[in-house]
Amino acid sequence: MRKDLITDAAIELVATSGMRGLTHRAVDRQAGLPEGSTSAYFRTRKALIEGFVERLAVQEQQEIVLDPDDLAGSLARTIDGWLVERNRTLARYAAMLEATHHPELRTILVHSPREMVNSLAQALGHEDPEASGGHIAAFLEGLLFYRLVGGGSTAGPAPGTEESLRDLKNAIEKALRP
């Protein structure tokens, strides 16, 4: 599908050139399409950003598989997968930073890992999964960002991710005990 080709090219372009490098012509070149192709699908830069953000959300949501019997392991595998897909994760963070200046783009903040952590909080029996989800999401985003920018392995799965998440899970369970 041409729209997917365009949004995938936009993701790659943002990952390698940053948000300033995102132009319709640059996406056309990246995708190997005739000039004007991207504009036919996404008339404005805002529409192009929204398009690639939606594509990111779909791709990341497809990778989230929570195993209730191994929550820490399944979270670790998801985060490690996002580290393997380094360019896609870099593009997501670039879009998140762009959203700080353009409130209409804040939908990037709604997906991953927010829905994943709400499920985790619910599985752990928290009374208000949405409230605790924000704290868990901040931890996961911090862990992912730290490893992505060089605080850990940047070439693929990071050793210690599962142990960190097991510690988080145990701390949450302990806090929820009466």
Image: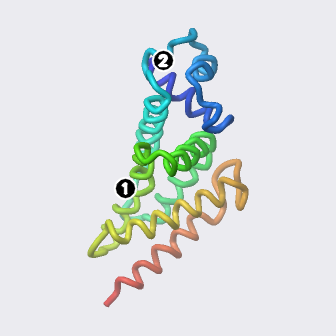
Q: Residue furthest left?
A: 127
Compared to residue 43, the image places residue 177 above or below, namely below
Q: Badge 1: few (under 14), some or many (20 or more) residues near its Cα, within 10 Å?
A: some
Give the labeled residue for mark 2. 39
Secondary structure of residue under mark 1: helix
Given residues 49 and 137, the one toward you in this image is: 49
Residue at 50% across / 18% down in the picture? Answer: 38
Given residues 53 and 123, the one toward you in this image is: 53
Q: Position of residue 123 (x, y in %)?
A: 32, 67
Q: Residue furthest top?
A: 34
What label does residue 115 carry, if any? Answer: 1
Compared to residue 44, the image places residue 79 above or below, namely below
Tell me: 48 left or right of 15: left
Residue at 41% across / 84% down in the picture? Answer: 174
Where does the C terminus fall, quadrant-wise?
A: bottom left
Residue at 35% across / 62% down in the picture? Answer: 118
What label does residue 164 carry, if any? Answer: none
Q: Position of residue 90 (x, y in %)?
A: 61, 45
Given residues 137 and 116, the one toward you in this image is: 137
Q: Position of residue 143 (x, y in %)?
A: 59, 63
Q: Position of residue 44 (x, y in %)?
A: 46, 26
Q: Earlier in the sequence, mark 2 or mark 1?
A: 2
